[in-house]
Amino acid sequence: MRDFLIAPSILSADFARLGEEVENVLEAGADVVHFDVMDNHFVPNLTIGPMVCKALRDYGIAAPIDVHLMVQPVDRMIDDFAKAGASIITFHPEASTHIDRSLQQIKDAGCQAGLVFNPATPLHYLDYVLDKVDVILLMSVNPGFGGQSFIPATLDKLRQARQLVDASGRDIRLEIDGGVKVDNIAEIAAAGADMFVAGSAIFNQPDYAKVIRDMREQLAS
Ligand code: DX5
Ligand code: ZN
C-alpha cells in the first residue's frame, strides 16, 4: 500500500489560538501542516507570512510545514520562508516569471519544491522541470478560500498526473487541495493522490482525531 499523508490546512483553524490548534491537530494524527499564503493579488484573500511560520517553529511545532504560496511575485518569499522553517514550498507556475529558477531557489534554500496547478491550469508546465519537483499539488477548487466544493474534473487530471509521476520513476508526492472530505477521500486516492490537504473538513469538527481516523479508514478500504 502507498503511504498517505494527511495535511490539515490551517486556513480553517482558529487563528487566535494557532499554536495550540496546530499542536492539537498533530496530536490527532496529522502528518504535515499545510500553510496557505495568500496575497490579495494572485488570489482574492490575504493570510499569513513567514513570521507566522517562524512563530509556529518557535512554539515547538516539529512536523513538516508545507507552504503553499499563492503570491505574485514568488521569488522574494522563498528565502524568507526557508529561514522561517518551511519544509516544502510550492508555488503556482502562473505566478512565476522564471519557473525553473524559482524551483532551483527553493531547493538551494534546502526545502522540497513543488508546482501547484489551478483547476484550469494544464500539467505541461511540468515538461522540462520534473527533475526539480518533489511535490505536484493539484487544486481541486479555485484557490482563495476554504470550504469550497471539490471540482470533479480534477479526478481525471489526478490520473494523468499519477501516470506522469509513475512513468518518471521519480519519488514525487501527488498532493490534492480543496474540498477533500471523509466521503470523497477514497475516490481521490484511487485517482492517484497520496497527500491530502483538508481544512474545513477537519477544523470545522469538534473531534479532529475522529475525522483523521475516519479519513485513514477510508484510505485503507
Ligand atoms: C484554498 C487553499 C486550501 C484550503 C482548503 O485556496 O489552498 O488549502 O484551505 O480548504 P478546504 O479543505 O476547506 O477546501
Ligand atoms: Zn492550500
Image (cartoon, rainbow, N blue to C red):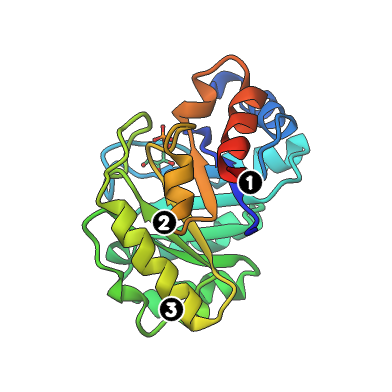
Ligand 2 contact, mark 1 (Cβ < 8 Å): no
Residue 189 appears at what percent x and percent y? 48, 51
Say which mark, if any, is on residue 191.
Answer: 2
**Does residue 12 appear in the picture of this structure?**
no
Q: Quadrant of ligand 1?
A: top left
Q: Which residue is mark 3?
A: 101
Q: Reading the chain from its start, which is encountered first: label 3 or label 1? A: 1
When the figure is inspected, residue 102 is found, relative to residue 51, above or below; the finding is: below
**Badge 3: how crowded within 10 Å, few (<14), some, or many (20+)?**
few
Which amino acid, by three-letter code, is at mark 3? Arg
Q: Do the numbered discs 1 and 2 sit on residues whose CB atoms are within 8 Å? A: no
Counting residues from the start of the chain, the first of labels 3 and 2 encountered is 3
Residue furthest out toward the bottom:
128
Q: Is residue 14 visible?
A: yes
Horizontal relation, residue 193 to residue 149: left or right? right
Within the image, what quadrant is residue 3 found in?
A: bottom right
Neighbours of disc 2 within 10 Å: few (<14), some (14-19), many (20+): some
Give the Cα separation between the discs numbered 1 and 2: 21 Å
Seen at 48% across and 38% down, the residue is 48
Q: Which mark is residue 32?
A: 1
